[in-house]
Image (tube, grey):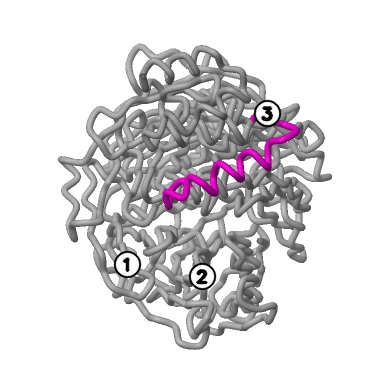
């Protein structure tokens, strides 16, 4: 994945007066954005696709704009100026409320000196401003002052941002970053982030508490909310002028001198895209996270499309080769590559279970890999999150959820209490053939389990709720329909599993600590997890509910200290765990497939073949295979059949218990 950068036509910029400099820029719809120019004090409306612009209005001559933001909530802008309100800050410390037609509705004297930074909260309810006077102020949406903060040393506030829950703020003064909660009584955190001044700060919306900072020392750094360093880049040779997480907190864009880089996960930067004689000092993502715009001091406006997405899952390989084309190959059916071309730009790409789903600006297209040339269309626009399961797929746009079968038929309309779309990420929602796990949008310790197998409308008030001790940063459901199981990683890195999560008051069991990422196998009951230095795989994690000894015997570890903490699991199919390193190279780790075969046989009730298999496969090493088989016997209420496995394992207590129960 990387940026495909283009610069809007120079002729249009000269005609629009953009050569005077573009201090601020903001999206207002899928393909349109506003700019506010420097010397000529004008507001322009742009079309990102064809590069055309229209002058909206002129500001008063005494105003010099410093930032521009869209205050509009979830409504489409079909007409210029319709239901549109912009927030504009100036060099003389004023906040202006400006309509889409350029009319100034309200002016507030916010600071005594230049406002260097202004940010809208993630829930669009509050405004944060920082100024040269060293003050940080929080305002209501209508620009009513709510709070004011200052440090003992009144250094200029050069950068600031909101947390994902809009309950905390982070701001930079000099080389320091200060994190302050808006909840009364909560202590603030402060740490030195760079050797020089911090020039930019962005707080991820992915609820993992990650802050990215860029400084005069030429480094980009990523921190957790306690100020612990998670990643630091090398010196880029020039200051990091601006950086910005996309709206779901999965991609970080970094701007420095004449370059723009994309970081997909911590420490994994793509190659730099060179921009001749231009350095973006203001970046803005559109709502579907497919496009980034940047304003440059030279007067140029850059448009960067996210291209090169790749999916390798369940035997399907899909590569974006342009903004409107994808190459697909299903290794289970054929080695031939097929090229899929669409009329609109591709926003998202997902593959698995014999299907490929493409989300464009106005619809979703479902391709069956066996009949690749006859896609099914679903009229769902503006999808920014896409997941696929064995029988259905999930699309999320700014208006809510959409569940469809892989044949394009509507299944259900989930209704989740306290739903806030801005908080949804790939990590906090997970889909299976008949269940949906989603973390609560306001209480992050709660996970909802929605069963849509029998209802078209899911009443979120009556669904099971699983409450954990700490905020949850990742949820994952296994793909085994007969034995649904939830895995959840909290903010402290503790991994929990919940067998039968759809039943009320389901039990919660701790499985491991210091976990960074988990992923279930696409077809087997295996669960993989990345810790700080190793890969852990549990063949049957549900065992934790009744026998810890069997759980230990069915767990394997692989040392990954040479990869560091930047590796991520990209797929877990059949007996292969694929881990991608920071340099984009992939490592494939083979996993024992005997337990998977035993699971399939015992699921079908073929105990004779299962017993033969476990004996032959465990002649020299009786550990994991016998333990897995014994666990399956317990789950299927077949204690007598597990005796030989317990004898091979030497578990005397279990043998005596079964003998007493069967007498």
Q: Quick one: SS at disc 1?
A: strand
Q: In this view, does 450 lie above or below 156?
A: below
Q: In this view, does 478 lie above or below 654?
A: below
Nearest the eye: 645 or 332: 645
What residue did someone put label 3 on?
532
Residue sticking out furthest to the front: 663
CA neighbours of label 3 inside 10 A, class few (<14), some (14 to 19), many (20+): some
| Label 1 to label 2: alpha-carbon separation | 16 Å
What residue did someone put label 2 on?
354
User: In this view of the protein, can residue 527 be seen by the observer?
Assistant: yes
CA neighbours of label 1 inside 10 A, class few (<14), some (14 to 19), many (20+): some
| Quarter containing the C terminus | top left
Extent of the magenta region: 602-623
Q: Quadrant of residue 142?
A: top left
Q: Which of marks 3 and 2 is nearer the N terminus?
A: 2
Q: Are marks 3 and 1 in contact (CB under 8 Å)?
A: no
Residue 651 at x, y = what percent? 56, 17
Nearest the eye: 132 or 347: 347
What residue did someone put label 1 on?
404
Q: Is residue 290 above or below residue 71?
A: below
Nearest the eye: 563 or 54: 563
Q: Residue 19 carries which label?
A: none
The residue lying at 20 percent from left, 56 percent from top is 454
């Amino acid at each position: 994945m990387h940026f495909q950068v283009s610069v809007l036509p120079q002729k249009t910029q000269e005609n629009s007066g953009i050569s005077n400099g573009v201090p601020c820029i903001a999206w207002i719809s899928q393909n349109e954005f506003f700019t506010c120019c420097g010397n000529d004090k004008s507001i322009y409306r742009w079309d990102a696709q064809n590069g055309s612009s229209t002058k909206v209005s002129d500001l008063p001559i005494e105003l010099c704009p410093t930032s521009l933001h869209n205050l509009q909530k979830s409504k489409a802008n079909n007409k210029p100026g319709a239901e549109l309100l912009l927030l504009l800050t100036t060099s003389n410390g004023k906040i202006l409320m400006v309509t889409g037609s350029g009319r100034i509705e309200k002016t507030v004297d916010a600071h005594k000196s230049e406002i260097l930074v202004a940010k809208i909260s993630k829930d669009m309810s509050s405004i944060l401003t920082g100024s040269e006077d060293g003050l940080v102020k929080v305002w209501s949406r209508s620009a009513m002052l709510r709070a004011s903060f200052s440090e003992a040393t009144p250094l200029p506030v050069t950068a600031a941002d909101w947390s994902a829950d809009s309950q905390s703020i982070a701001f930079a003064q000099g080389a320091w970053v200060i994190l302050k909660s808006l909840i009364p009584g909560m202590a603030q955190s402060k740490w030195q982030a760079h050797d020089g001044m911090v020039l930019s700060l962005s707080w991820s919306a992915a609820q993992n508490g990650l802050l990215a900072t860029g400084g005069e020392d030429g480094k980009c750094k990523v921190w957790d909310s306690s100020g612990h360093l998670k990643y630091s880049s090398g010196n880029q040779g020039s200051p990091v002028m601006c950086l910005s997480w996309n709206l779901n907190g999965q991609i970080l864009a970094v701007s420095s001198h004449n370059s723009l880089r994309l970081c997909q996960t911590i420490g994994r930067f793509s190659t730099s895209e060179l921009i001749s004689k231009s350095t973006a000092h203001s970046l803005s993502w559109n709502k579907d996270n497919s496009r980034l715009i940047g304003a440059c001091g030279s007067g140029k406006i850059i448009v960067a499309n996210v291209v090169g997405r790749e999916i390798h899952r369940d035997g399907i390989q899909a590569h974006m080769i342009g903004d409107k084309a994808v190459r697909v190959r299903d290794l289970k059916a054929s080695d031939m590559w097929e090229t899929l071309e669409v009329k609109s730009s591709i926003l998202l790409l997902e593959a698995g279970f014999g299907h490929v789903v493409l989300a464009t600006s106005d619809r979703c297209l479902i391709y069956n890999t066996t009949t690749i040339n006859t896609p099914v269309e679903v009229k769902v626009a503006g999808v920014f999150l896409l997941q696929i399961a064995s029988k259905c797929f999930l699309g999320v746009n700014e208006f809510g959820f959409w569940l469809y079968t892989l044949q394009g038929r509507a299944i259900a309309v989930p209704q989740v209490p306290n739903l806030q779309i801005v908080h949804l990420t790939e990590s906090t929602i997970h889909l299976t053939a008949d269940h949906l796990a989603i973390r609560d949008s306001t209480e992050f310790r709660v996970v909802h389990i929605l069963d849509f197998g029998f209802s078209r409308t899911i009443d979120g008030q009556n669904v099971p709720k699983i409450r954990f001790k700490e905020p949850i940063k990742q949820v994952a459901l296994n793909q085994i329909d007969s034995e649904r199981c939830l895995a959840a990683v909290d903010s402290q890195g503790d991994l929990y599993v919940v067998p039968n999560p759809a039943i009320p008051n389901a039990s919660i069991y701790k499985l491991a600590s210091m976990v960074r990422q988990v992923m279930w196998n696409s077809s087997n009951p295996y669960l993989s997890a990345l810790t700080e230095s190793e890969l852990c795989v549990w063949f049957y994690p549900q065992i934790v509910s009744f026998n810890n000894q069997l759980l230990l015997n069915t767990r394997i570890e692989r040392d990954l200290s040479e990869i560091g903490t930047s590796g991520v699991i990209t797929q877990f199919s059949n007996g292969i765990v694929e881990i991608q390193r920071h340099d984009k190279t992939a490592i494939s780790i083979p996993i024992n497939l005997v337990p998977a075969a035993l699971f399939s046989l015992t699921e079908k009730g073929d105990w004779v073949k299962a017993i033969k298999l476990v004996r032959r496969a465990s002649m020299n090493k009786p550990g994991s295979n016998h333990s897995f088989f014994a666990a399956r016997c317990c789950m299927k209420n077949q204690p007598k059949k597990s005796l030989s496995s317990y004898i091979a394992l030497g578990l005397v207590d279990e043998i005596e218990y079964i003998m007493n129960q069967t007498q």
